[in-house]
Image: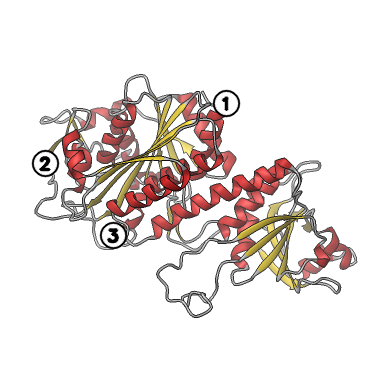
Amino acid sequence: MTALTLSTAAAAGLRADAIVIGVAKGAKGPVVAPGAEALDKAYDGRLAGVLETLGASGGEGEVTKLPAPAGFKAPLVVAVGLGAEPEKDAEYDAEALRKAAGVAARTLAGSKKAAFALPLTDAADAGAVAEGALLGAYSFDAYKDSGKDGRAKGNGKAPLAEIALLGGKPRDKAYRAAIERATAVTEELNRARDLINTPPNDLYPEAFAAVAQAAGKEHGIKVQVLDEKALTKGGYGGILGVGSGSAAGPRLVKLSYTHSKAKKHLAFVGKGITYDSGGISLKPAGHNETMKCDMSGAAAVFAAVVAAARLGLEVNVTGWLALAENMPSGSATRPGDVLRMYSGKTVEVLNTDAEGRLVLADALWAASEEKPDAIVDVATLTGAMVLALGNRTFGVMANDDAFRTAIVEAAEEVGEPSWPMPLPDHLRKGMDSPTADIANMGERMGGGLVAGLFLREFVGEGITWAHLDIAGPAFNESGPFGYTPKGGTGSAVRTLVRLAELTAEGDLG
């Protein structure tokens, strides 16, 4: 785990493997960002020119390495692009700082210590840099053979071990709080990434539930686990139906974080399909390899609840993890079967690969019974949302326009791209069933919206609700970028945590 500290040390005298500075894209060439004044002085004020000679432009994600000048104990300077230079008197955007710090941390994998001399105007900037650096330093090597030095043989480099934030104020309460928040959120987000990246033979519903139970004991969160017997007794037909084809039985996990001063109650519901083969409606070849990520919504909910507890937020947060493995077998649910859901409604299953909405439906109704102030569900729900918004943006649907807007704004604030999506009532008719109350499929066009309309049917009357379809950004199959690694990303964790903070502060609803 990467260690991070605030430091008042001078850049020249700090013993480290590298000094990280920022460079922006100016109108006439690269511009050295605040924080690197000592280095620029050592280069006789010509650092920008040196960087330009080496090909630097200041573009986002760009990395330029050069030897440190005489008098500096660190041998290397890593200049990382911040994107466009802010207008006069404007500050660097928090997301630009996060991304730059993340790129630098990834670049310095294998190093023991790096000093980050990026622009720090206030505590919020320190938090952004810390967040980006800690997320960028993430590595998942649990299944790679390691040598005696502990370094994974697969890539030969361990994550950056230590980060010193130059320009920080260790004695300042706001700076300390920003670092503590960044550490808690990123550690839990990285734990969500670990869960997403864990192979499905090791992370099945019971195993996921055990992880939640252990975290509950550690952080004072009450955890209740419903196994097959309890689910059968309770009538959770959706979760049982999806999990019926697997030798690994389904689970519904409830995590309850409460605060004595809380005035509001939020419920987060996560889709936790630990592996999705499609069931009897088997996925075609080439679509199965990454389906361990179909529990990303549950991972996000789990991480957000634990982060809320670690931060001591004055809000009650309940997390519901709807866990099942969707497999084909002689006992699996068939297309044409009718399931009686926990709410009492019946659902005709037309496609067993539209399983996420079935487990979420039961969990949404269970969450509704407690009458929280709002419910937010998170799921890798539809390929249609990926077609609509691409691989880096999640869709937001809601039964309340103001709540949907608040979520989109919160996501933007923390650096998670999202987009508001509608719930057109005319699409509901496509799910009419001659046999049951509703079918689990509707019109093909607008499939992501149809899924949202299905979920809306299982939200208690009068309860504010939103649905986050994270199918695009939950799992990164391409190369790493910014602070985002290849593989599980932890999408929506920071948005959920921010929603909890806003609710605790009385700024949401």
Place of residue 389 in the rendered image (x, y in percent of width and height, measured from the top left): 44, 45
Which label's residue is closer to the chain start, 3 or 1? 3
Q: Where does label 1 land, which residue?
A: 507
| Mark 2–mark 1 distance (CA, rounded to whole Å) | 46 Å
Which label's residue is closer to the chain start, 2 or 1? 2
Q: Residue at x 43, y 58 (%)?
A: 194
Q: Which disc is residue 471 wearing?
A: none
Which residue is at the far top? Answer: 462
Asked if 478 appears above or below 453 in the picture, the reply is: below
Which amino acid does the dot numbered 2 rest on? Answer: Gly
Q: Where does label 2 land, which residue?
A: 336
Q: Using residue 58 as the reference point, say whether residue 220 is left or right of it.
A: left
Q: What element carries label 3?
A: loop
| Mark 3–mark 1 distance (CA, rounded to whole Å) | 42 Å
Q: Which residue is drawn at 46% across and 25% down?
A: 401
Which amino acid does the dot numbered 3 rest on? Answer: Asn
Q: What element carries label 2?
A: loop
Q: Where does label 3 land, which residue?
A: 288
